[in-house]
Image (cartoon, rainbow, N blue to C red):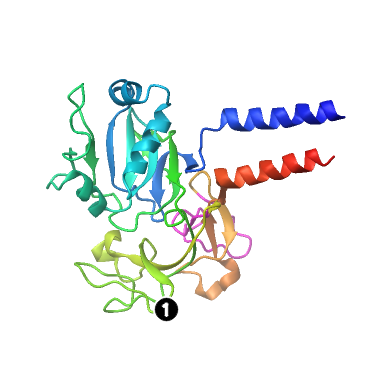
Amino acid sequence: MHLLRNFILVKVFVLCFSNHRSTEAYSLVGSGWCLTYAQRGPPAIWRNREEFDQYYCKQFANTKTTLECLEDLCNELSDCIAIDWKSNENVHLRFRSEESVINVCGDSPTEVYACRNFQTITNDGQGWQVWRGSEACKNNCDVTSSGGTWDGRQANGECFVKNDENLVREKIGCRSDICTDYFNDCCAPSGEPRGCSLPGYTVYEGGTSSSCGMHGSDAVYQCCLSQPSSEIISNVCRSDICTDYFNDCCAPSGEPRGCSLPGYTVYEGGTSSSCGMHGSDAVYQCCTSPTVTYNGLLGLIFAIVVALMLV
């Protein structure tokens, strides 16, 4: 019995710690690009992965893996919040806001430009490039999910988020009825002030607004109640990927419910602008499942080990 118990203990530790690269400082969010609640990529600096391996990682830290080198660099930058790689030939450090990238790399009128102030001199003559495209998140760019496409295909890389309690958040109770812009409609174009009327709620990108069509999605915002968490990266819920008959997240009388993106599952609740006559029971939403981080996994392993030792 003791031999069997020891064998199981060894197998648990070997399997768990040899196959998982996530450290206590970072957690794997999922496959693809790092994305915000509004499904936008946080602004980033990037460079070619092979060049990074050859001219930085192997030269200055030859005992570390590429991911470990990226983590070290992200740790040097307080507003670096995540890492993604393997979705194309480059590696990326993601930032909390556009201003954060400007503080590190300097400003430019173009969407892609050389990062002038961060490791600009390397043996290969190359350096980091800035990406802050028009489709990128601008502010409060907390990473809550992963996905997206690359070159017309589903992105298949990996997104790792820094396990800072101020960065990894469980977003709950996002609302579009407590906005304090001029018309209280969660639509704030052209620098119109954004805010939330209830304490504990913070402005985030995304959400819905019935009167913002002519201004585009960049003018829409929402108010979310945020709660720090180092154990769970919360589920992300959306009302724009439903596959019922009218794609409006309203499915009365047995109408089929579904979600058009992989990784999303049908849940009760949400909002639908065309479901008033059918009642709230007909409304649904598409949500990802909560992801247990590496810290949570360690806690589970520890509990299993203790239980086995007591046998």
- What residue type is disc 1 on? Leu
Residue sticking out furthest to the left: 109
Q: Nearer the viewer, residue 72 or 254?
A: 72
Residue 160 % position (x, y)? 44, 41
Question: Residue 240 location in percent, x, y?
Answer: 44, 57
Residue at the location (20% across, 49% down)? 102
Magenta stretch: dominant secondary structure: loop
Q: Foreground: 21 or 252? A: 21
Residue 269 lies in the magenta stretch: no
Q: Is residue 83 above or below residue 97?
A: above
Q: Report x, y in % for residue 66.
A: 40, 28
Q: Is residue 128 shown above or below 185?
A: above
Which residue is painted at 35% across and 21% down in the image?
Answer: 58
Residue bounds of the magenta highlight: 233-259
Residue 262 visible somewhere in the drawing: yes
Residue at 78% of width from left, 43% of height from top?
A: 307
Residue at (26% x, 70% y) in the render = 188
Would you name the residue on which mark 1 appears?
Answer: 198
Tell me where residue 112 sits by quadrant.
Answer: top left
Judge left or right: residue 240 versus residue 307: left
Q: Can you give x and y, in whole percent of width and height, for residue 193 in the image? A: 25, 73
Q: Is residue 86 visible?
A: no
Quadrant showing the C terminus? top right
In which quarter of the view is residue 177 placed? bottom left
Residue 123 position (above or below residue 138):
above
Disc 1, SS:
loop
